[in-house]
């Protein structure tokens, strides 16, 4: 039967000598049979797939690639650079605060440093680093060829890096934002802050919001549309639950902060009075709009990291995660309740006590799903057999730090106690325990875990252990004393403190600890760079892990999977062995393996991926994926320059850049027949 | 390259677990040591004047302090317990087997049920305690007889006693609040510029001062004494140096203080040329911003100095109130509180001495 996607050079009916030539993509029919087959590694078909999916070499490929793996690594590297920048800002502050009445920094310098420290860590590190993991891993763990919108993926990265540069652009001029990352009105208003610093912050945040929004859309659609056949929602890795939940949360929360910053910019530069009390505005409105976003945001920056631990820790316990269902539900529940607690950042604003009671109660309730996850992890270790590799150390350390951060959070959720604790160093201790404990430690553990997959090399066990202990000890020496400083009454955001307040010792200890922690980070970086060049070869699955990304080469080929796998459980690579273990020692039965990784749907007529149904992941359509494109880069650049024009009040420039955006969007969205999804025919339907 | 399973030797596992357990234990010890060292800093005024964890001087703060102890004990207990469970989970004896072997997906759910169940019950009990405490500290048992209006400025506190029906008892002062012992006092909170927060930890929790609205809280002191307060909402350059004091006195002493403060400065001691010069210097250099009731100095942007000499501290708690410190502040304010709204006032030596003499008459 003739294959409608190819044509014969000879007359119809002559199937003999001439090999088939694939039709150009835009001439392919809109439906064709979907065939199952095998493609051996290194074979001619594998090489053909590689050429289809590979990015162009050199700088051309650098600007035009839409490969999720490249974009994911860029996110990780860029986020880490921002982590180091924020860390240096912190170390300078700790030198200033090591002793009372120090004069290393002027108040203005200190205020810029603590503001940029918060902005950098929360917006330019905490979410992008998790986006980096998820970008790289999602198609691989879900059994797909790429994200649902590859060009949008590239756009989200370029906008992120340009927004980061935008936010930092005023720092070298001594004009960084200085009203705190929370940027309360009226201090952030024009009357008290005339310079361009707050405008840089406001416009930069709106720009960054574009990146976060399109990234979140991409994750949600990829999960609902592109999972491998058979990967029902009950079989997706917990990292997917974490990022899906965080993405949904971001889609609902980011508009609030974009609106807040936009209204602030309008107040400052256009003459509106949203927050301007002298003209009928309400300063408290800023706090509401900001915290309605910022509280869900903190869950967005920890839930994917908890997912990393839920997926990787069981590998080092040699058993599946205890309570997958409860953990998945607790992830979603945390995010949902997280939208109902924002007033716990505003307990001291004079809101009536009955209202505060409701939000305080919700803040207690949100602890319960976290307890579910914590006991799931402990149970997994307890009933498993721990293997003491470096990732395990980071994940075990994470569980402890999570609990410490969580219980100090319960203390701040108690309304009358929060009236003492809020805006003291107690909260600084709490937030660093949860943010470093639940984001940074799993991230570094995750890098040790997935570095072999990213690069094909292992990191160093010895250096990793030293680095972990230095980081763990340094972290606790830095941040535990902050609880004490807070209980002794030390408020936040003070550039110095008097010598007779009882805070001298705890501050000195904290400052020393911060340098110990920094040393640990340095050791980790040394290990990273050394292992890139000299690490031992890793192979496909050095950890003997169960999920799909370990079924492909390290690093994966550009097309991820030569054939689309068919999935039958949560642990495709552990099937058979898990059942054998359950049967108390009976030999593994070959017929019990149900997932098919070597044999699956063949999708090789250009860049193609499989679209599946949302709940059960049954095969649905053949998705045509776009070629590499410069348009995301240009659109990001034009969008950033629009905001630069607004910042500098140059109307013609802004208009020109807007035109550039419009042209880029038109080019991007221009309909192409080659991108229309194809309907798979069943074999009996494909008549000639 | 497969994991080198042989490396997972029991003694290394034990070493790791010991280290983790040691960390948890050290952490618990540190918690205890730190709290006892804080307790050792007696008395509070000299050790850590803002220490609300161990010192509560009135009914607006004492229930919260007890709640704080309870929740802290719970927090330490939970963290220590989880740390122990973690260590035990890691080091517990397991039958020797091939490390490459997998364990079945079975068991462990009881951990989640029991752990979450116990946590939920404890959390519910704590929530009830929290809400009871909230009810107790949110408002006083009886309506306050005295209201003080505090307006927060960058970076000082305007204190207005304006609730008396007899206007002869109403006046404005700065940075030092006096209250009678043993009765609740309502504090009406306003802001002249940005968001600040009023906080005197040993007497009560904190409340923001937000421009455009008047917030309220109450404070009460059981014993006479001086209680330090601090702005605790970031408000700009000198947020770090925006302190104040609450002085609790017997009702008789308070009444006397209030009556004295309400009087303006009128005639000055006759025949003192230095003081007269100082008053002239004040009128030329200071009266644009500062006020001294009973004189021509009627400035409103800066602290009222009518009874400057009666105060304990100056510059919103930055310096003790001595003549030397006063002159230091006047001449070098930008070094003491950079970017504050008090400029460095250049004075000749003679003028400085005269001004100092005048200020020391403002009892």
Image (cartoon, coloured by chain):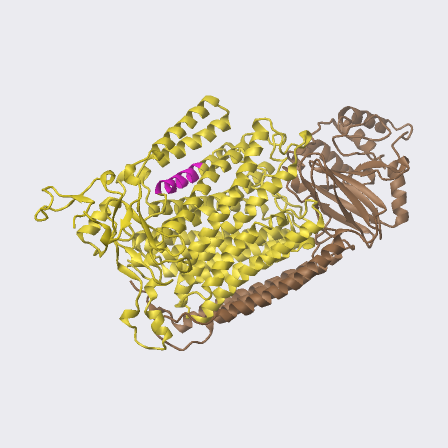
Side of A474 relative to B298 (left or right): left
Q: x and y percent of residue B28 in the render? A: 59, 65
Q: Using the image as rendered, state which of residue A501 and residue A579 is in the foreground.
A: A579
Q: Quadrant of the N terminus of chain B?
A: bottom left
Magenta residues, dominant SS class:
helix
Q: x and y percent of residue A202 in the render? A: 53, 35
Residue furthest to the left in view is A17
Query: Which residue is found at the position 78% from the left and 46% from the top?
Result: B246
Side of B310 relative to A393 (left or right): right
- What chain is the yellow one? A
Q: Quadrant of residue B207?
A: top right
Q: Is residue A254 above or below residue B204?
A: above
Q: Using the image as rendered, state which of residue B178 and residue A571 is in the foreground.
A: A571
Magenta-colored span = A150-162
Side of A504 relative to A680 (left or right): right
Q: Using the image as rendered, state which of residue A283 and residue A352 is in the foreground.
A: A352
Q: Using the image as rendered, state which of residue B29 and residue A128 is in the foreground.
A: A128
Q: x and y percent of residue B60 in the render? A: 76, 53
Asked if residue A159 lies in the magenta stretch, the reply is yes
Q: Is residue B203 above or below residue B1?
A: above
Q: Is residue B230 visible?
A: yes
Asked if residue A64 lies in the magenta stretch, the reply is no
Q: x and y percent of residue A572 in the render? A: 34, 62
Q: Is residue B105 above or below residue A1?
A: below
Which color was chain B given?
Answer: brown
């Amino acid at each position: 039967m003739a294959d409608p996607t190819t044509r014969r050079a000879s007359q119809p009916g002559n199937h003999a000598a001439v090999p088939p030539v694939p039709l150009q993509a835009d001439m392919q029919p809109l439906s064709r049979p979907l065939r199952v087959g095998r493609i051996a590694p290194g074979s001619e078909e594998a090489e053909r797939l590689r050429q289809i999916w590979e990015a162009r070499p050199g700088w051309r490929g650098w600007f035009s690639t839409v490969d999720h793996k490249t974009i994911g690594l860029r996110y990780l590297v860029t986020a880490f650079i921002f982590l180091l920048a924020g860390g240096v800002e912190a170390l300078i502050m700790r030198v200033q605060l090591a002793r009372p009445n120090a004069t290393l920094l002027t108040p203005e310098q200190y205020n810029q440093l603590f503001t940029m420290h918060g902005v950098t860590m929360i917006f330019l590190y905490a979410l992008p680093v998790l986006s980096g993991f998820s970008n790289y891993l999602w198609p691989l763990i879900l059994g797909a060829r790429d994200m649902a919108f590859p060009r949008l993926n590239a756009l989200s990265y370029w906008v992120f890096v340009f927004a980061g540069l935008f936010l930092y652009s005023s720092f070298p001029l001594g004009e960084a934002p200085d009203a705190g990352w929370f940027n309360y009105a009226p201090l952030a208003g024009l009357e008290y802050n005339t310079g361009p610093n707050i405008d840089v912050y406001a416009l930069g945040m709106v720009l960054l919001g574009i990146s976060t929004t399109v990234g979140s859309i991409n994750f949600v659609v990829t999960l609902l549309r592109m999972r491998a056949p058979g990967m029902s929602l009950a079989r997706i890795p917990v990292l997917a639950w974490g990022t899906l939940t965080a993405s949904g949360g971001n889609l609902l929360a980011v508009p609030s902060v974009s609106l807040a910053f936009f209204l602030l910019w309008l107040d400052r530069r256009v003459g509106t009075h949203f927050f301007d009390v002298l003209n009928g505005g309400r300063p408290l409105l800023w706090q509401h709009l900001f915290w309605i976003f910022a509280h869900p945001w903190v869950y967005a920056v920890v839930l994917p990291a908890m997912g990393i631990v839920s997926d990787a820790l069981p590998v080092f316990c040699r058993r599946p995660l205890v309570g997958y269902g409860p953990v998945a539900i607790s992830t979603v529940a945390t995010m949902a309740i997280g939208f109902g607690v924002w007033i716990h950042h505003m307990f001291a604003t004079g809101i009536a006590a009955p209202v505060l009671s409701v939000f305080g109660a919700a803040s207690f309730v949100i602890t319960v799903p976290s307890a579910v996850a914590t006991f799931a992890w402990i149970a997994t270790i307890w009933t498993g057999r721990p293997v003491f590799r470096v990732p395990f150390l980071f994940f075990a350390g994470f569980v402890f730090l999570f609990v410490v951060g969580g219980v100090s959070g319960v203390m701040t959720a108690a309304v009358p106690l929060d009236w003492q604790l809020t805006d003291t160093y107690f909260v600084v201790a709490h937030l660093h325990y949860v943010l470093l404990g639940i984001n940074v430690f799993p991230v570094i553990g995750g890098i040790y875990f997935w570095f072999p997959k990213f690069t094909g090399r292992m990191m160093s066990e010895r250096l990793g252990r030293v680095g972990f202990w230095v980081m763990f000890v340094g972290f606790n020496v830095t941040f535990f004393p902050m609880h004490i400083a807070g209980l002794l009454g030390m408020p936040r955001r003070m550039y110095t403190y008097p010598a007779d307040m009882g805070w001298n010792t705890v501050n000195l200890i904290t400052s020393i600890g911060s340098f110990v922690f920094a040393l640990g980070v340095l050791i980790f970086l040394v290990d990273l760079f050394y292992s890139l060049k000299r690490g031992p070869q890793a192979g496909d699955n050095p950890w003997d892990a169960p999920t799909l990304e370990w079924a492909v080469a390290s690093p994966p080929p550009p097309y991820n999977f030569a054939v689309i796998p068919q999935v039958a459980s949560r642990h495709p690579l552990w099937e058979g062995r898990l059942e054998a273990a359950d049967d108390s020692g009976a030999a593994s039965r070959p017929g019990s393996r149900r997932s098919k990784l070597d044999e699956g749907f063949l999708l090789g007529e250009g860049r193609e991926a499989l679209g599946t149904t949302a709940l059960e992941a049954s095969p649905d359509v053949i998705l045509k994926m776009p070629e590499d494109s410069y348009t995301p880069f240009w659109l990001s650049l034009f969008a950033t320059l629009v905001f630069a024009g607004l910042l500098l009040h140059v109307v013609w420039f802004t208009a020109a850049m807007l035109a550039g955006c419009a042209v880029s969007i038109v080019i991007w969205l221009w309909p192409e027949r080659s991108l229309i999804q194809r309907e798979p025919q069943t074999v009996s339907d494909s008549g000639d | 390259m497969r994991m080198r399973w042989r490396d997972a030797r029991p003694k290394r596992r034990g070493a790791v677990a010991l280290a983790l357990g040691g960390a948890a234990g050290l952490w618990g010890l540190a918690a205890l040591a730190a709290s006892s060292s804080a307790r050792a800093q007696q008395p509070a005024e000299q050790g850590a004047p803002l220490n609300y964890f161990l010192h509560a001087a009135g009914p607006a703060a004492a229930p919260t302090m007890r709640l704080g102890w309870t929740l802290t004990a719970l927090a330490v207990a939970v963290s220590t317990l989880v740390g122990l469970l973690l260590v035990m989970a890691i080091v517990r004896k397991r039958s020797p087997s091939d490390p490459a072997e997998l364990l079945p997906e079975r068991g462990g759910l009881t951990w989640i049920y029991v752990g979450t169940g116990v946590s939920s019950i404890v959390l519910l009990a704590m929530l009830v305690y929290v809400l009871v405490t909230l009810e107790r500290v949110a408002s006083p048992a009886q309506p306050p007889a005295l209201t003080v209006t505090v307006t927060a400025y960058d970076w000082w506190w305007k204190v207005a006693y304006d609730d008396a029906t007899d206007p002869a008892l109403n006046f404005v002062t700065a940075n030092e609040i006096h209250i009678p012992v043993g009765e609740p006092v309502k504090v009406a909170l306003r802001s002249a510029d940005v968001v600040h927060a009023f906080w005197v930890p040993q007497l009560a929790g904190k409340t923001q001062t937000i421009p455009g609205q008047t917030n309220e809280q109450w404070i009460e002191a059981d014993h006479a004494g001086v209680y330090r307060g601090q702005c605790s909402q970031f408000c700009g350059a000198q947020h770090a140096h925006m302190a104040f004091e609450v002085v609790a006195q017997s009702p008789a002493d308070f009444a006397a203080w209030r009556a004295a403060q309400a009087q303006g400065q009128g005639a000055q001691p006759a025949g003192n040329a230095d003081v007269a010069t100082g008053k002239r210097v004040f009128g030329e250099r200071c009266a644009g911003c500062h006020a001294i009731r009973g004189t021509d100095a009627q400035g409103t942007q800066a602290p009222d100095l009518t009874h400057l000499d009666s105060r304990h501290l100056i510059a919103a708690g930055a310096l003790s109130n001595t003549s030397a410190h006063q002159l230091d502040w006047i001449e070098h304010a930008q070094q003491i509180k950079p970017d504050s709204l008090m400029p460095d006032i250049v004075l000749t030596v003679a003028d400085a001495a005269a001004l100092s003499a005048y200020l020391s008459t403002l009892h």
